[in-house]
Image (spheres, rainbow, N blue to C red):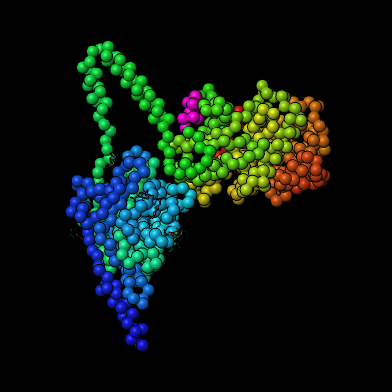
């Protein structure tokens, strides 16, 4: 009885070294390894001994496994199977021609060496239907150079991750290593330089360590990933061990130059000085040179013809290259994408004559879509990091689903290198500010139209704040962001764009987005945009529309410098109507103007908590609710809480993205 209990423990103690077939191999280059490796797909061994998993063809996969299965579990009767320790070292090189390669490769253990995995994000390991299924028994360390679609939850496009039965990593870290004083140094997996990787699993402590570093650096003493995991339920008794890789629309050549693997002990070091050199990226052909020689030989007429031909061909090629799409894989995952070619044609090649204006976020062009003949406005936003771009497009795709008669409809987007193009409904009447301030259009806007526009903007803003599936803070409400459709309805533009500036920024330095004069005072303290800060800006807009004046007018007497203060003073003196836009003359509805002025002051109070919500604002504007009449009291308490001194320091103390007021619309 006793013996039968003790025996399994003894077995377990002895197990790790004596009861498994220990494996130990080292390949400094793979010239001699052809018979020991099973290759499939695009994997092959080059003439100088590099194991190339894929070349840079699109959407291909390649596998290379050690031919014989390796015992990875101690499977003794009556004892739970335990994964045994292993250690591996390899040198790899990811070579990309042009910019942005993919999709990476993985060191893998699988129950079969004939994996039927998909390309691209699946790295040739799994496919859409098998991904995440625990019956896969696939364990991998991924070296991923593409940030896949949302379902893969990739942290970036340059990371190392631990994958268990799924390409959604259980843990991943940006490619980097720790120096001896624990400083983290980032590097590019795709740099074209050889990189060393160490993977060590301790079957007793059940710790998996992954370390990577450029070849030029000594082995970092601290691993990049140290992950507590019991591989016993994941591995099968015998596993195939090797590499798997795939390319997608982005492609690289994935090469392994040396590999050593050992169970139950530390893998033997590679002889770095004897590793084969990775293949050189293909050079451009010398066709054009040969072409030039021919020209010299042929008669002068032919030469002229050839030159003309060459010119038109190269012009055609240049034109085609200019319009060619370089899609990243994920781009297809988001709806409302426009082909760049269409937008290029629509704007006659982003010609200056088609320029409508330059809003705070970039240039806006008028365009006519070639397929439908529809008029659109195309906003071109430049120089954003590739990193933030993807998240932003996810959001843009989301904004595209918003529908409201007081929002400028976002029809779609297109990404072109570092540029983001947004396609909006065209607003034939341009922006509100031109009607308020530009001499040609001044005085063309009646009070009724102004009141209708203000109500419309309130409804659009209430939709963003309260009616959509998530709260969207506009962050840049102002007259130049209010656009007018053919029926002179006010529609909000640029919603959701402020987020663009938050991406990839150091969270410690808050970037204040907005326009001077419309920025709620609490924003400079908290930096946290809230619906109430939009209400503040809306209050300024109310005053602006009633008074026909910008919130800050530097060229006036001091007491009129800030519109809000001036209105407040007149309100306190009981002479509110003094501030009304002189261009309106006497043709306005007195009660409505008074309401708008009071509401403007109520909305732009410096304490965010006491500002009304946009829903309440609509009720006041519709006369469904009566605005409390003691605005005067309210106005008094305001005056000292927001003194001139603090205002004066605004421009210098705030790191601000201010939207241009030169916009002339959009
Ligand atoms: C590799 O294959 C050769 C020939 O099949 C064999 O003799 C050798 O033992 C194998 N090497 C390893 C490490 O298994
Ligand atoms: C990649 O390899 C395939 C098969 O070996 C070959 O046909 C193709 O030309 C190669 N492509 C490149 C870009 O080297
Ligand atoms: C996915 O992989 C599994 C397991 O290798 C295979 O049985 C299945 O046929 C594959 N499905 C597709 C669609 O390729
Ligand atoms: C992989 O699976 C697909 C779908 O099941 C099948 O059509 C294909 O033949 C398989 N390929 C291999 C190499 O087994
Ligand atoms: C996991 O794979 C097994 C075997 O291929 C299959 O029977 C099972 O339905 C799959 N489970 C899920 C959740 O897809
Ligand atoms: C790894 O992650 C997958 C999904 O994220 C989860 O189902 C699985 O349990 C995790 N495995 C371990 C061992 O933590
Ligand atoms: C870190 O320290 C270890 C021993 O303490 C040393 O062998 C190694 O070379 C050092 N690595 C670097 C990058 O300095
Ligand atoms: C894994 O890393 C940890 C932390 O550096 C270390 O204590 C442990 O010994 C390592 N284990 C193996 C198997 O390398």
Could you tell me if residue 138 is visible in this image? yes
Q: The C terminus is located in which quarter?
A: top right
Q: Is residue 302 above or below residue 550?
A: above
Assess whether residue 660 is covered by the magenta stretch. no
Whether residue 373 sits left or right of residue 299 in the image: it is: right
Whether residue 614 sits left or right of residue 173 in the image: it is: right
Q: Percent from the top left, x then y, of residue 268?
A: 23, 62
Marker count (numbered):
0
Nearer the observer, 524 or 546: 546
Q: Percent from the top left, x then y, of residue 642?
A: 69, 45
Magenta: main secondary structure equals helix
- Extreme residue toward the bottom, this view: 1
Residue drawn at x 27%, y 70% as measured from the top left: 20
Q: Percent from the top left, x then y, of residue 147?
A: 43, 48
Q: The N terminus is located in which quarter?
A: bottom left
Q: Give the image quarter of residue 176.
A: bottom left
Residue drawn at x 31%, y 80% as measured from the top left: 10
Q: Which residues are magenta?
A: 340-350
Whether residue 568 sits left or right of residue 650 in the image: it is: right
Residue drawn at x 63%, y 27% as measured from the top left: 428
Assess whether residue 341 is covered by the magenta stretch. yes
Q: Is residue 109 above or below residue 158?
A: below
Could you tell me if residue 105 is visible in this image? no
Q: Give the image quarter of residue 582.
A: top right
Nearer the observer, 247 or 524: 247
Q: Percent from the top left, x then y, of residue 90?
A: 28, 56
Nearer the observer, 579 or 188: 188
């Amino acid at each position: 009885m006793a013996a039968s209990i003790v025996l399994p423990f003894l077995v377990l103690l002895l197990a790790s070294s004596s009861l498994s077939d220990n494996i130990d191999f080292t390949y400094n280059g793979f010239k001699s390894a052809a018979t020991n490796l099973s290759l499939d797909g695009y994997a092959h061994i080059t003439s100088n001994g590099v194991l190339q998993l894929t070349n840079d063809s699109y959407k291909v996969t390649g596998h290379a496994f050690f031919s014989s299965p390796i015992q990875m579990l101690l499977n003794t009767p009556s004892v739970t199977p335990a994964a045994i320790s292993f250690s591996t070292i390899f040198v790899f090189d990811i070579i990309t021609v042009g910019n942005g390669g993919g999709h990476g490769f993985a060191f893998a253990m699988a129950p079969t060496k004939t994996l039927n995995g998909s390309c691209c994000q699946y790295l040739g390991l799994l496919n859409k239907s098998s991904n995440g299924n625990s019956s896969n028994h696939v364990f991998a360390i991924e070296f991923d150079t593409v940030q896949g679609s949302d379902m893969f939850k990739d942290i970036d496009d340059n990371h190392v991750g631990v994958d268990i039965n799924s390409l959604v990593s259980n843990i991943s870290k940006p490619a980097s290593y720790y120096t001896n004083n624990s400083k983290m140094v980032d590097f590019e997996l795709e740099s074209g330089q050889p990189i060393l990787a160490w993977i060590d699993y301790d079957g007793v402590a059940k710790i998996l360590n992954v370390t990577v570093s450029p070849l030029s650096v000594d082995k970092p003493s601290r691993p990049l990933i140290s992950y507590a995991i019991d591989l016993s339920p994941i591995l099968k008794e015998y596993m195939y061990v090797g590499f798997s890789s795939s390319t997608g629309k982005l492609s690289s050549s994935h090469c392994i130059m040396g590999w050593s693997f050992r169970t139950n002990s530390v893998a033997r070091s590679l002889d770095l000085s004897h590793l084969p050199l990775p293949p050189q990226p293909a050079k451009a052909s010398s066709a054009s040179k040969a072409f030039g020689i021919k020209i010299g030989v042929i008669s002068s007429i032919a030469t002229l013809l050839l030159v003309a031909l060459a010119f038109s061909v190269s012009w055609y090629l240049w034109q085609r290259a200019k319009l060619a799409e370089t899609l990243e894989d994920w781009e297809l995952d988001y709806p409302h994408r426009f082909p760049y070619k269409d937008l290029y044609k629509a704007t006659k090649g982003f010609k200056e004559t088609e320029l409508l204006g330059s809003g705070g976020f970039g240039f806006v062009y008028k365009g006519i879509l070639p397929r439908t003949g529809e008029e659109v406005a195309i906003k071109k936003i430049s120089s954003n990091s590739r990193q933030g771009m993807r998240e932003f497009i996810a959001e843009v795709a989301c904004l595209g689903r918003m529908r409201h008669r007081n929002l400028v409809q976002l029809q779609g987007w297109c990404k072109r290198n570092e540029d983001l193009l947004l396609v909006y409904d065209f607003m034939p009447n341009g922006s509100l500010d031109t009607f308020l301030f530009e001499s040609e259009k001044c005085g063309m806007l009646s009070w009724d139209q102004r009141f209708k526009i203000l109500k419309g903007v309130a409804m659009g803003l209430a939709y963003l704040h309260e009616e959509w599936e998530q709260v969207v803070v506009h962050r840049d409400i102002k007259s130049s962001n209010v656009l007018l459709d053919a029926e002179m309805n006010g529609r909000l533009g640029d919603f959701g764009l402020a987020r663009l500036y938050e991406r990839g920024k150091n969270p410690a330095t808050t970037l204040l987005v907005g326009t001077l004069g419309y920025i709620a005072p609490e924003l400079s303290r908290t930096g946290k945009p809230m619906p109430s800060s939009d209400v503040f800006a809306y209050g300024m807009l109310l005053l602006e529309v009633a008074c026909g004046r910008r919130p800050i007018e530097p060229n006036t007497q001091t007491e009129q410098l800030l519109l809000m203060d001036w209105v407040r003073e007149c309100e306190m003196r009981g002479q509110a109507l003094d501030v009304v836009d002189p261009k309106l003359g006497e043709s306005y509805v007195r009660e409505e103007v008074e309401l708008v002025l009071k509401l403007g002051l109520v909305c732009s109070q410096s304490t965010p908590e006491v500002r009304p919500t946009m829903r309440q604002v609509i009720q006041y504007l519709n006369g469904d609710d009566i605005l409390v009449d003691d605005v005067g009291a309210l106005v008094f308490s305001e005056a000292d809480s927001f003194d001139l001194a603090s205002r004066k320091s605004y421009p210098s103390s705030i790191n601000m993205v201010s939207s241009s007021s030169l916009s002339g619309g959009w």
